[in-house]
Amino acid sequence: MSNNGAYPIVTVRIQRFNPDTDKKPYLQEFQVELKPGTTVLDALHEIKAHQDGSVTFRRSCRHAICGSCAMNVNGKNELVCKAPLKERLDRKGRVTIRPLPYLPIVKDLVVDRSSFWEQYQRVKPWLVPPENIPEKEFRMSPEEVAALRNAETCIMCGACYSSCQIIALTKEYIGPHALLKAFMRVMDPRDAIPGERLADLAGGDGVYRCRTIFNCIDACPKGLNPTEAIETLRKLAQKRQAFEAARAERQKRLSEPIPSP
Ligand code: FES
């Protein structure tokens, strides 16, 4: 690559794998200029645009919103559009980028996320409203809204899913991402089927499969806590009927003003 000497040159090691031609993945090194503000994603773009157009990766928004650029950088899952290249270099000025682990590789840094989305669909991540929908709006207390906020900001990047040691062993586990979204629906006072959800989540592939290793918390680029949500779902599953009855009572007052504490 050309270098006018203005910027230091650093090494980006990318795991390459083309299932049509390669027997197994291997690391390929590229050199890029370390310009101020360069992210790991910028380095990938630079390589693809000027050095090797066949390097394959996913990205879209470049602003940590869409979740498509999650990869494994130096052994840790993260959004590469949010990762400053300078801070990811080792003492020899190298960074190593691999695809998300425990998922089938489609090509280079692109993985097949089918199991991730299947588990998401499986928990019915949509709101199931009651039959007696209020004519005006649903009224929720600040506490009820706050309980959902954690899960609401999840961007479904897959960093937690592919860092989970249970997922490494089996895809017969719902996974932290989908359990976090299921938690959001269970806690939502507008949802009419929390009992059905809790019964389902307490099955063999659900909340009791988690071994509270906390990898999902470490991996989440949004600082969310799926483990805590899973713990809450476990507790609620044990008092499912009482929770269901309380929800039915709550839904009789969905359009009423929230009393001040
Ligand atoms: S490109 Fe959208 S989150 Fe990174």
Image: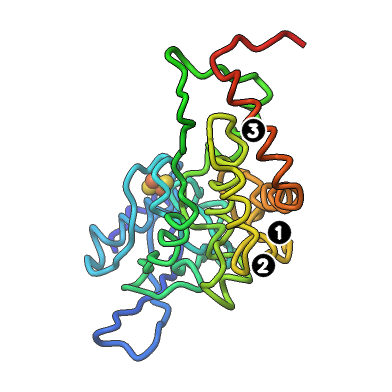
User: Is 149 drawn above or below residue 83 in the view shown?
Assistant: above
Please tell me which residue lies in front, 164 or 234: 234
Q: Is residue 128 left or right of residue 151?
A: left
Residue for badge 2: 209
Dot 1 alpha-carbon crowd within 10 angstroms: few under 14, some 14 to 19, many 20 or more: some
Position in image of residue 52 (x %, y %):
25, 68
| Circle count | 3
Dot 2 alpha-carbon crowd within 10 angstroms: few under 14, some 14 to 19, many 20 or more: some
Which mark is first along the chain, 2 or 1?
Answer: 2
Amino acid type at circle 1 is Phe
Can you tell which mark lies on residue 214? 1
Can you tell which mark lies on residue 247? 3
Which circle, 3 or 2, is nearer the viewer?
A: 3
In this picture the colour scheme is rainbow
Position in image of residue 198 (x %, y %):
62, 51
Position in image of residue 222 (x %, y %):
57, 43
Residue drawn at point x = 57 percent, y = 74 percent: 168
Residue 204 picture quarter: bottom right
